[in-house]
Amino acid sequence: MPPAREREEERGAPGRIVGAITGLITTAVALAAGHLAAAFTTGAASPVLTVGQTFIDATPEWLKSFAIRTFGANDKNALLAGIFCVLAILSAIVGIVSRHRRGVGFAGLGVLTVIGIVTAVTRPTATVWWAIPSVAAGLGGAAAFLRLTRRPSATGEGREAEAAAGFDRRRFLKSAAALGATAALSGGFARYWEQRRLAQAGRASLKIPTPSSPAGPLPAGVELAVPGISPFTTPSKDFYRVDTTLLVPQIQLKNWKLQIHGMVDHPITLTFADLIARPLIERDITLNCVSNEIGGRYIGNARWIGAALKPILEDAGVQSGATQIVTRSADGMTIGTPTQIAMDGRDSMLAVAMNGTPLPFEHGFPVRMLVPGLYGYESATKWIVDMELTTLESFHAYWVKRGWAQQVPVKTSSRIDTPSSSTNLAAGPVTVAGVAWAQDRGVGKVEVQVDGGAWSPATLGAEDTIDTWRQWRWRWNATPGTHTLSVRATDDTGMVQVGKPAPPFPSGATGWHTIQIQVG
């Protein structure tokens, strides 16, 4: 006589496909329950997000840089997709194994619940309540697993064989469909609720006061009107985004506050109303990421409104020896800024508006910090909620701990926007154009080189301020053949853009942007 397990399978016990479906639906219900619970507590405590955020923090620097280069602004979506794929595979495997060992299924749920709880409560801004979504996920998953693996007794002649085997296919399919629909609806409702909370943050109704120090109209000639060139002002929707958060913080204005403490004589707590009641400045500032490759797109120029940072720090009374400003965001990110640079007279600010409207959520609503002349990772804290005056030696911020340099001014650089690399052109006059930047110093000259020959000066667009990029163009009489075009900039101090190629890590890329053009 065959073993009991083989007899059971011969008589219609759940097969591998049923087991895999059981695991997948159980996990889907668990995730939906956790996400729904997070919508009513803290959105950032959703189990998938806390696990993903912990994974980001533990990821080696080379892998982070690879993800940014490969996926760009979609790096978070790629990570979430990877997490879901891994969960799906593991869930299917556990479901198959648990066909005959239900304890394996419960053990799998237990492990996932514990992982969710641990990663949630250990987040920098977490409270004990952050464990609730993971607990809800575990309970929801357990209920779904019990429903899908329940063994009914025989009811009717037509179902005697299945009942005797302990498996009712019809009941299973109905349960699976119901639970799958429940998971989808719950997830959708959670998302809707998050969007509702987002709207309640008050951004749509926020009126930014008129700046006491407006930027004024752009000078004539700032825009060179060359097709294909980057616009002088980058639309907010096109502005680059690089950060580590999986869920964009949704902070209500009434709940926002900034604590300024540490090596100061008078610790300050500012509400949003306090902040916008101060004299506001409006400035055009170009911001770029240290991970930007030569010729890369992690750079943009916008018109910002905010409260000047220096007077705020002066009110707090920065003590002698406080060489670093450590800022913290609502998602736990830390950024370190040299105090001397932030207070040397440049237009450092706590920004509340971008291109004429309140900051977009993805770009730091309600408040972010900006320090012209520094890369974003050492100055441009989004969703800022804390500012501590300390020393450069006593604290290493998030990216510095991962090997990036602690103090780096923006490097003089330039980019060819048009024509694009590998373009086929007709022989004759061609306009080569792009942008150059050297924030806090200004761009004094741009030159173009063809096939390693002499450098030819380009025509510069008018300068707005030394804190913004400048457009440039150069007329080239293209001859047939394959040509190599390079560009370099010189800042107003006379410093020529470094030509030796170097990767962004650890202090920003160097080299001349070079493209190949085919002229027919």
Image (cartoon, helix red, strand yellow):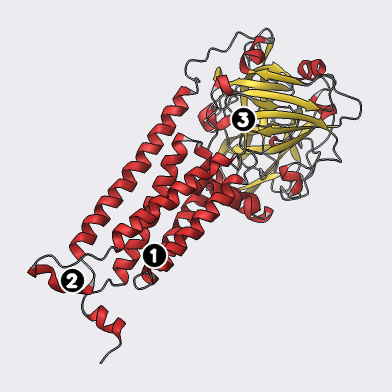
Local packing at callout 1 (Cα closer than 10 Å; few below 14, some 14-19, many 20+) is many
- Can you see residue 181? yes
Going from N to C along the chain, the mark reached first, 1 or 2, is 1
Query: Can you name the residue that lies furthest to the left here?
Result: 157
Quadrant in which residue 446 is drawn: top right
Identify the residue position indicated by label 1 in the image.
Answer: 92
Q: Can see residue 460?
A: no
Amino acid type at circle 1 is: Ala
Q: In this view, does 519 lie above or below 383?
A: below
Find disc 2 in the rendering and name its residue. 162
Contact? badges 3 and 1 (CB < 8 Å): no
The residue positioned 53% from the left and 24% from the top of the image is: 252
Q: Which of marks 3 and 1 is in front?
A: 1
The answer to whether 490 appears left or right of 273 in the picture is: right
Which residue position is annotated with label 3? 383
Q: Which residue is drawn at 38% across and 33% down?
A: 192
Q: How many marks?
A: 3
- Is disc 2 placed on a helix, strand or loop? helix
Element class at badge 1: helix
**Residue 210 lies in quadrant:** top right
Q: Earlier in the sequence, mark 3 or mark 1?
A: 1
Circle 2 packing at 10 Å, graded few (<14), some (14-19), many (20+), is: many
Q: Where is residue 155 in the image (x, y as percent from the top left)?
A: 13, 65
x and y percent of residue 112 in the render?
Answer: 49, 57
Which mark's residue is nearer the viewer, 1 or 2? 2
Q: How far apart are marks 3 and 1 (CA)?
A: 39 Å
On-image quarter of the N terminus? bottom left
